[in-house]
Image (cartoon, grey):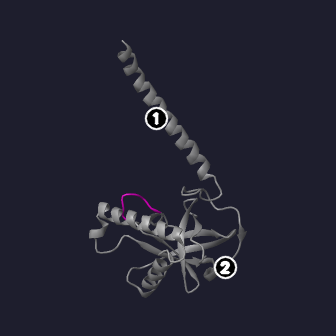
Amino acid sequence: MKNSSRNRRWPVRLALITSLAIALWLISSFFLSRSDGPVFIFAGGPLQSGENVELSAMNWNTLDAQHELEMELVGEQSSLTLWFSVHDGIPYVACDLDCVDGVLARWPQKVQDDNRVVVRINAMRSDGRVVHVPHGTEEYKAVRAGRNRKYSGGGSDRAAAETAAHSAVVGVGETLTGRSQREEPGDRIYRIDPR
């Protein structure tokens, strides 16, 4: 009789745990979508705070010492944290894993129809637009080389650890999705131009 009673409680407990998890997910999604920017690794709402400055007025060569910036996808009214690099005083962002035509809709797919963005770094916010840099171009090669140097970990143990973990995830992901067998790599680099 004791086993029968336990067996009947298990589905009720499972339903309760599942309901609680769904409720927590809905509540956190609601608050994240209304936050002023991303929260840690989670996408957030539109960027609201920060001094509004022109993109060209920002000293990107100095800002390149930092690893991340926040970028709002204006059409999606959501924001995320991205690694960035600078080449010739111009900021670039990238998506390294199966960014287009992949299993999941990544941010590059979301900017195909509306490339307007807002970037925030060092409490400064600026309007811009992202422009895809095609594979194989001289600009792509120079930016990719600079990005690889920046995130190789030469000056920081944190950067080295993050890059190693990131590279492992990208390698496994490209193998699992079949992207490694395709002619064009799955990564995308975008230049951030003034709007």
Q: Does residue 112 appear anywhere in the picture? A: no
Residue appearing at x 48%, y 82% in the figure: 146
Q: Quadrant of residue 172?
A: bottom left
Residue 106, percent from left and from top: 45, 62
Residue 159, percent from left and from top: 51, 70
In the rendered structure, which amino acid carries the disc numbered 1? Thr
- The answer to whether residue 126 is magenta is no
Quadrant occupied by the N terminus: top left
Q: Is residue 91 left or right of residue 59?
A: left
Residue segment shown in magenta: 100-106
Q: Which residue is denoted by mark 1 in the rendering?
A: 18
Secondary structure, magenta segment, majority class: loop
Residue appearing at x 56%, y 47% in the figure: 29
Q: Which residue is denoted by mark 2 in the rendering?
A: 58
Say the numbered circle drawn on residue 145.
none
Residue appearing at x 42%, y 84% in the figure: 141
> Taking 2 as reference, is 119 above or below it?
below
> Taking 41 as reference, is 4 above or below it?
above
Residue 160, percent from left and from top: 48, 70
Q: Is residue 96 left or right of residue 125?
A: left
- Disc 2, SS: loop
